[in-house]
Image (cartoon, helix red, strand yellow):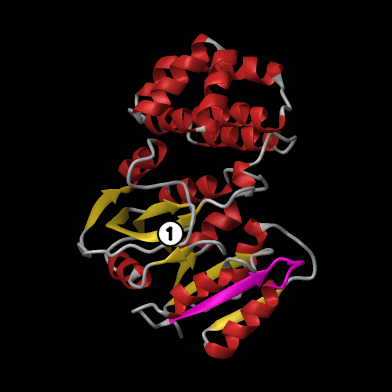
Amino acid sequence: MVKISVVIPVYNAKNYIARLFDSIISQTYIDFEVIIVDDCSTDSSVDVINEYIQKDARLKLISLEKNVGAFEARKIGIMNSNGNYVAFLDSDDWIDSKYLELLYNNILQSDLSCCEFISVKKFKTININYSMTAFSYGNKEAIELLNSRRDIYPFLWNKLFKKDILLEVLNESAVNVLIGEDYTIVINYLNKINKVAVVQDKLYYYYQRPGSVSRGGFNVKMYDVLKNYDNLIEKFSEYSEIQNSIMSYAMYEKLAIVASMTKNKKYDFELAKKIKKELKDNYKKYFICNPPFSIKIAFRLYKFNIRMFLLIYKILNRL
């Protein structure tokens, strides 16, 4: 039985997926399988996938009969996997040749292993002088780092999970949101474990694709996103320090949702005012986890004036 299952949800990725597959089959660690879940692509993604299946028997394709979204596609991939560990990759990203090797080596002494990543707007790789070192954190410290966006980030990619713990989290977590599903799974996973290892090398290439879901404008599904964050805050109500850091993380995400209104000019100022009141009522709590300076500035600006916040966001977004 293979040790690692790599799960990839695919939807209309014909222009990107070949470079991901090239990076996978070039891995120095070889004891893995790749479960590709095609979520009813309407382009020629499946043709590209089948070409690579012919090249490497470790790649397997599941073709869904109806579109279910990335989260459900990942769950289907996990349920059809054979490894003890699970890694998720997005179809438009790619990985360093030592990605699986270093993550696997570090999860042997922990419950979750992560690596640093690099955001790119075009295809490239970097020459890495591998440090082969990793920082280790307990789960409470890891949650604080997640919420302050330091070392541990709210993504399913750039991580290697223990499959049995991950399945527990997925079975307990009702996630049906457009944005924030990764964070929901990661924080619930961290809450169940004891130790996290963070590899200091940048082994994952995150491609910032124009027009992706995470870069879209405001829509009605955002209300479900807000509800999801509020449910998480309530879930951790027994742990005040953790709850405060979750509140800080969630507030910044709420400001991002308000800012997204500028992209398609669909404004809900009643919602924006409600979020401002929430920010003012709990203002000091949002700084307890010492968020990055840019987030502190965003909090202060939004608290001062919503319209000025939106104007400055639009100006910065054009740069």
Identify residue for label 1.
205
- Residue 244 can be seen in this image: yes
Residue 251's spot in the image, x, y percent?
A: 51, 27
Q: Look at 36% across and 57% down and name the residue there.
A: 114
Residue 61's spot in the image, x, y percent?
A: 64, 79
- From this view, report whether residue 207 is shown above or below residue 184: below
**For this view, does 262 lie left or right of residue 93?**
right
Q: Judging from the image, what secondary structure is the residue with disc 1 in?
A: strand
Looking at this rendering, what residue extends furthest in the top direction? 304
Query: Depth check: 8 or 163 in front?
Result: 8
**For this view, does 15 lie left or right of residue 250?**
right
Q: Look at 46% across and 33% down and name the residue there.
A: 249
Q: Look at 57% across and 75% down and name the residue there.
A: 35
Query: Depth check: 19 or 104 in front?
Result: 19
Residue 312's spot in the image, x, y percent?
A: 52, 21
Label 1 sits on what residue type? Tyr
- Residue 163 can be seen in this image: no
Q: Residues within 10 Å of mark 1 (few under 14, many from 20)?
A: many
Residue 34's spot in the image, x, y percent?
A: 53, 77
Looking at this rendering, what residue extends furthest in the right direction? 66
**For this view, does 73 lie left or right of residue 98?**
right
Q: Does 34 lie within the magenta span?
A: yes
- From this view, report whether residue 268 is shown above or below residue 253: above
Residues drawn in magenta: 32-44
- From this view, report whether residue 233 is shown above or below residue 207: above
Q: Does 248 lie within the magenta span?
A: no
- From this view, report whether residue 151 is shown above or below residue 28: above
Q: Look at 64% across and 33% down and name the residue there.
A: 227
**For this view, does 47 lie left or right of residue 292?**
right
Query: Depth check: 277 or 299 in front?
Result: 299
The number of numbered discs placed on residues in the rendered structure image is 1
